[in-house]
Image (spheres, rainbow, N blue to C red):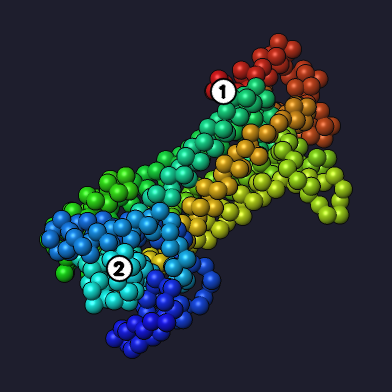
Amino acid sequence: MRIEKDFLGSRKLPDETYYGIQTLRAVENFPVSGVRQGPEIIVSYACIKKAAAIANMKLGTLDEVRGKAIVRATGEIIDGKLADQFPIDIFQAGAGTSTNMNVNEVIANRALEILGRRRGDYAYLSPNDHVNLGQSTNDTFPSASHIAIASASKRLIKATYDLADTLDSKGKEFKNILKSGRTHLMDALPISLGDEFRAYGAAIERAAERIELRQGELRELPIGGTAVGTGANAHPKFRETVLQELSKLCRMSFIPPRDAFEAMQSRALMVAFSSSLKELSVELTRMANDLRLLNSGPTTGFSEIVLPAVQPGSSIMPGKVNPVMAECLNMIAFRVIANDSAVTMAAQAGQLELNVMTPIMTHSILESVNILSNFLPVFQKKCVEGIVVSRECCKDYLERNSSMATFLVPKIGYVKAAEVAKEAMRRRRPVVDIALERKLITKKEAKDLFDTEHLMPNRRR
């Protein structure tokens, strides 16, 4: 055991741990969820500490002996080593002080070890004075959050565009499948199944564009503001230097905030990004509900499409198959929307010079990004790509759709067309047959009025 001290007193830590006394206190104070900070935030934090050490060496505020040891230690964390040394719960001290000090302590003790010194020898290399030089939790945690979210969302953006492309391809495949449209869940004018799927693709593509736009806004980092945005205790050129180093290290172009104080007070950029995930989820769950409805049956539902069978659907009903991929997508979307609510509440809870709720915002957004990124490619492959059409069902519904009487209105007027629709529903006969029986139109007019090109004049080819 080794003994470490802080201004609250002394504590014993096992010799093998790289974290220190402040991490130990946080573990004891916040035994909440058992969920630790994800690797995205730890790696992003290590990148900040590495860039800060390089910047401070360049600016002459950190000697090269300590600085190079810190750089080496941070590099190991970035490579995935020491991952078991970050035990802090996602629910923790406000602003993320516990996580910042956890990272500082691990880096300091590993750097001390690299230099041949004992862990805990903070008089020589300090978590606060050297690893945290020119920084504060208040500017590093939101900066690490932006980096982690921007990096993690690359995979989501690709997956979302890929899904949109697949939906559009299905739209082209189904372009000649005419079917009944539905509004208010009631029969409406004809549409092609291809148009429905192209519309899904367009909605998902638009959502991907919004995520990409919001991701770009996260390039603004508050790093260099230290405690309240003034940059106290940081070299005057620290911000620009550390941003240059971070951009090289993360292969992303990071920029200073529009206003240093707004960047400390407001988490609006994170709210906007979270909102774009909510927008995607709204479109996904709407589409998933439509697919479940169109697939419903096979004998008592719509049965216009058949979703791929990926597993048995019931423990008691033999042969039953459920739309499980769409159901899973629904649940993921619900979780993302719930996470966005947490982000919204946390963002409005900021007070004066700082928002202390950033840890829960970061975790919520990263969870949303990860579950969407993980499942969208699976949904694309195991659900969308394998959808087939029940052509006869689509044809039958369309022929018996009383809303087809709409196309009679220019010839016979709304009132007479409504009478035809009513009789067609009563006799369960096609509208065109009733109109011909009543001699309201000729056979040539019937052919022209109910020709595909007339039914869908603006049809995309």
Task: Tell me which amino acid carries mark 1.
Answer: Arg
Q: Is residue 298 left or right of residue 236?
A: right
Q: How many marks?
A: 2
**What quarter of the picture does the C terminus occupy?**
top right
Q: Is residue 427 left or right of residue 74?
A: right
Q: Position of residue 119 (x, y in %)?
A: 34, 74
Q: Nearer the viewer, residue 163 or 7?
A: 7
Q: Residue at x 54, y 23 (%)?
A: 460
Q: Position of residue 459 (x, y in %)?
A: 56, 23
Residue found at the far top of this picture: 444
- Assign a secondary structure to mark 2: loop
Q: Residue at x 68, y 19 (%)?
A: 450
Mark nearer the N terminus (1 vs 2): 2
Q: Residues within 10 Å of mark 1 (few under 14, many from 20)?
A: some
Task: Tell me which amino acid carries mark 2.
Answer: Gly
Q: Position of residue 208 (x, y in %)?
A: 45, 41
Front position among marks 1 and 2: 2
| In this view, 234 is above or below 29 | above
Point out which mark residue 345 bears. Answer: none
Q: Nearer the viewer, residue 397 or 422?
A: 397
Q: Which residue was labeled with disc 2?
A: 116
- Assign a secondary structure to mark 1: loop
Q: Quadrant of residue 228?
A: bottom left
Q: Position of residue 15 (x, y in %)?
A: 42, 77
**Residue 186 in view, yes or no:** no
Point out which mark residue 459 bears. Answer: 1
Query: Distance of mark 1 from mark 2, alpha carbons?
Result: 74 Å
**What quarter of the picture does the N terminus occupy?**
bottom left
| In this view, 176 is above or below 271 | above
Q: Quadrant of residue 44?
A: bottom left
| In this view, 254 is above or below 74 | above
Q: Nearer the viewer, residue 305 or 89?
A: 89
